Image (cartoon, rainbow, N blue to C red):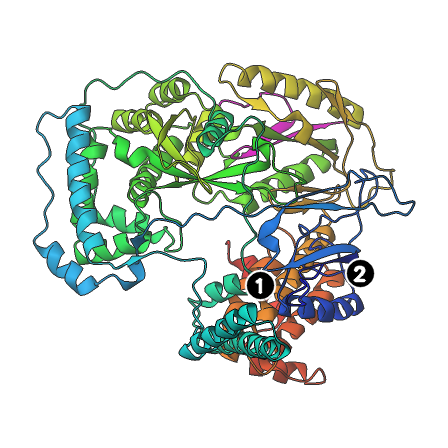
Amino acid sequence: MCREDRGCCLCTLGDFNLDHPLADPCRSLSERQFIISTGYFDAAFDVPYHLLNTPGVYTRFPFDTISRPSGLDLAFANNALSPLVSSWDTPLPSTGSDHVLCVITLKPPAIMLPPPTPHWAFLDLCAVEKALESFTTLPCPSKPTPNRLSRWFDISSTRLTSLLTSHAPSKRPCPRSKPGWSPRLSSLRREYHKFARISHLDPSPLNWSNVKCSRRTYFKAIASAKKTHWSDFLSSATPRSIWTAKRFAFGRPPQRFPDLPGDSDPAKVAEILLDHYFPSKPPPPPLLRLTRYEDYTPLTSEQISRALSKSSNTSAPGPDHIPYSVWKSVHRIKPSLLPSLLDPLLAHGFHPPSLKKALGIVLHKPGKPSYDSPSYFRVIVLRRTLSKILERVVASRLSAQAIICSIINSLLCGSLPRRSTADAALVLQHNVESFHRLPYKVSTLFLDVKGGFDNVESPSLLSLLHRNGVSPYLVQWVGSFLRDRTCRLTFQGSPRLFAPVSVGVPQGSPISPLLFVIYVSSLDLAIPRSLIISYVDDFAVTVASPSYRTNVRLLQKSFSSLKRKASPIKISFSVPKTELIHWRTTRSNEPPCSLPVQLEGQLFYPQSRLKWLVFIFTPAFDPRSHFSWRYSLANAALATIRRLSPPRMGLTPYLCLSLARSLLPPILLYGSAVWNPPPSIMGPMSVFWHRVCRWITNCFSSTNITCLHRKACLPRCLFLYATSAALPA
């Protein structure tokens, strides 16, 4: 597909017969396949082209549940066309080959400029420091009611945010802003339009020749200016701005507008999305009065410092547009300010309505043929950073009390200190191997909670906390935190109005995973030779018996018992996502067991390879599958960052080193705390790490490996593995 007036190619589709990590991160590629495909992909991205295919999803239809789609069919589009791609489908009849014609629907995007926001990167900290010296919060009401305390907090926080906003310039990004623009380009543009107007009035051959010459000069100058600006930007990049360079290099996928049936305007679209993602629930009882609790421990500046230390400066802010970096500066200048603002709220167990407002960013799920259903979108909830600071403090206090009060047992993982995904995987493997030594046959059923956070009933959660002896001020604060929430959906053309929403536990909150873990802590079964391990909303039910057939009956019985215990608290399991595995030892000579488990009329056959908590498990705990997958992901990541440093231009070697050292080892060696990479995988990993060193140093392929690592200032892969494996300990 080409544009006639400029002769540039907008879209390219074809049977490329190429496999590349960017198109399929899960496929294991040979060195020859990687070398052959890299040149084509580098040339495509230099145009620049964007890959329309979702990684791992291709344009071959129909999808077959038996065989895996191949990576031969790819589609590319440049910056001019990719925002216009609305949907693609295959309604046409077969052509007789193994490919089906693809119909691409183009639709102009709706562009709406965002409102002006403070440019916090240019905040005048010297002026803020002088202003904060005389700034004090208003005295808290002596006998506060919910309305009085909420009004006091709104006035105090508004005074503080207004002070900060007044010392930061405003910014309003424009989609047509060109950072590489110069006065010469403006002159060439005026000259081109002057000749175009003359040619329109007098279409003579001479005038048309002047138009073509001026247009050719103008567009060549634009291309040269873009290339020069990009090279200068990369050469002067810093470790902090390297991710900005990555975003500029790859761009962002064009956002799809919700094209829902029955919608007449953006307000109707917002209403449909709110009803889908936040279904109505009975509201919790209203809060009529406030009490200052005697067992309350005052909030200190050290607790605020710990909460801020766990917060990322790059985290997206909520409706007030104030990032964590601003609050860190305020707390560093005046440590007593934030505790004086948040302490009265926690002392009375109250969360004001202004901190319950959130932005709901509507994002499309990639790889969908059309976007005419709310299920093809997801909502990312952004909350006020000041509220999340208080939530982190409460989460720290509540987790400590939950462990002391024995609400949470040792098999509940997630959002708790020293209970990570690696801990859950190690506990599962340890118990399976312990059962094998007895010896027993062991089977595990992996379940996923349907809805997760949205199904938490506030009265049941508060009753559970109160029965187990949690401090009354924390119980009261949790109840206030969960009621009367509002959200404003954000998409192109959306009405900028907050609407009340009914949620169980809000998404994007630091305390939400902990509240959910406490809520499902009662889902435990007293069955001999069995255990239930959970990581937030992912459950693993393991049973052991003399035979796999008995395991199947025990798993079906355990699922029925879990379902009965979860029904009173309105928790259900997503049965279609259930997976089964029959464990075996490496020395077992028996054929693999193929007995399925039947749940709600559906049969689930045992898997030979499944993914749970970002780990790839096999029946014999063979780590080759997991590290082969990590190796493919690392290859895809390297192919991505190599575009930032082409030969003779781009990033400096120091920045390449910083990028490779911070990005690639966590991807490549994730899981080394659980398993040891076998020699068959460690060899390709070492070769991959040598390729990383050559990319950093631009050394020849025949360079001595010892000299290569010294010049790149990177240790060998074996040393990286040893460090990564010892890090959790």
Could you tell me which secondary element the residue under label 2 belongs to? loop
Q: Which residue lies furthest to the right in this view?
A: 96
Please tell me how crowded label 2 is: few (under 14), some (14-19), or many (20+) other residues with Cα within 10 Å: few
Q: Residue at x 72, y 71 (%)?
A: 39
Q: Nearer the viewer, residue 670 or 350?
A: 350
The N terminus: image quadrant: bottom right
| Residue stretch rendered in magenta on the structure | 520-547
Placement of 438 over or under 80, stated as above or below? above
Ranked by sequence position, the earlier of labels 1 and 2 is 2
Q: Is residue 76 magenta?
A: no
Q: What residue type is labelled 2?
A: Phe
Could you tell me which secondary element the residue under label 1 belongs to? helix
Q: Can residue 351 be seen in this view?
A: no
Image coords of residue 519 (percent x, y): 45, 25
Residue at which label 2 appears: 16
- Res. 665 mark: 1
Please tell me how crowded label 1 is: few (under 14), some (14-19), or many (20+) other residues with Cα within 10 Å: some
Q: Is residue 145 visible?
A: yes
- Which is more foreground, mark 1 or mark 2? 2
Image coords of residue 312 (percent x, y): 38, 53
